[in-house]
Image: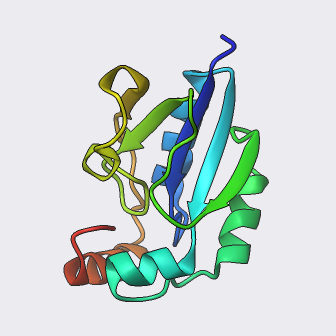
Amino acid sequence: MPQIGYLAGVFDLFHVGHLDVLERARAACGRLVVGVLTDEWAVDAWGARPFVPLVERVQIIEHLRAVDEVVVIDDAQVLTGALVFAADLDGILGVDDLSGVAVESLQELPVARVSRSTILRAAIDQRQSRSSVA
């Protein structure tokens, strides 16, 4: 399975749902590259900075076994020639966010788990209520 996979998101308030999607993406490709969106992108999209600074979000993603490489991105760009993954989960780009990607290069991943932390869910829900992109 030599194909490179690509998944992009903010990955703020990292939780088990993010981990699950990253593991599903990695299982579907030979190498997984993850694009972590900048704080500035989040401000433009959400109207607020992420709770967790970019450098810390990158470090968290870099230390996951499912991830082979992390790149910092400042827009919803994709890796040319890669299988692009999308998920309907807070902080990860979904199909609607990736409208310029060819259908044959796009794979939507199912979301099986989300955080059960009431404090974390409240923070995520508050942010989502301010923006259509989470």
Q: In which quarter of the image is the C terminus?
A: bottom left
* Residue beneath the point at 37% across and 36% down: 101
The front one of 73 and 29 is 73
Task: Name the residue at 23% across, 84% down.
Answer: 130
* Quadrant in the picture for residue 108: top left
- Residue 58 lies left or right of residue 90; in this view the side is right
- Which residue ends up furthest to the bottom in the rendered image? 48
Residue 28 picture quarter: top right
Instruction: Please state the horizontal and vertical placement of residue 51, each as a whole percent of the image.
Output: 52, 85
Measuring from the top left, give residue 122's x and y in whole percent: 32, 80
Side of 9 where 27 appears, left or right: right
Q: Position of residue 35 (x, y in %)?
A: 60, 53
Residue at the spot 66% in from the left edge and 10% down from the top edge: 1
Numbered label tally: 0
Q: Which residue is drawn at 62% across and 47% down?
A: 34
**Camera-side residue of 56 and 36:** 36
Q: Is residue 134 above or below residue 24?
A: below
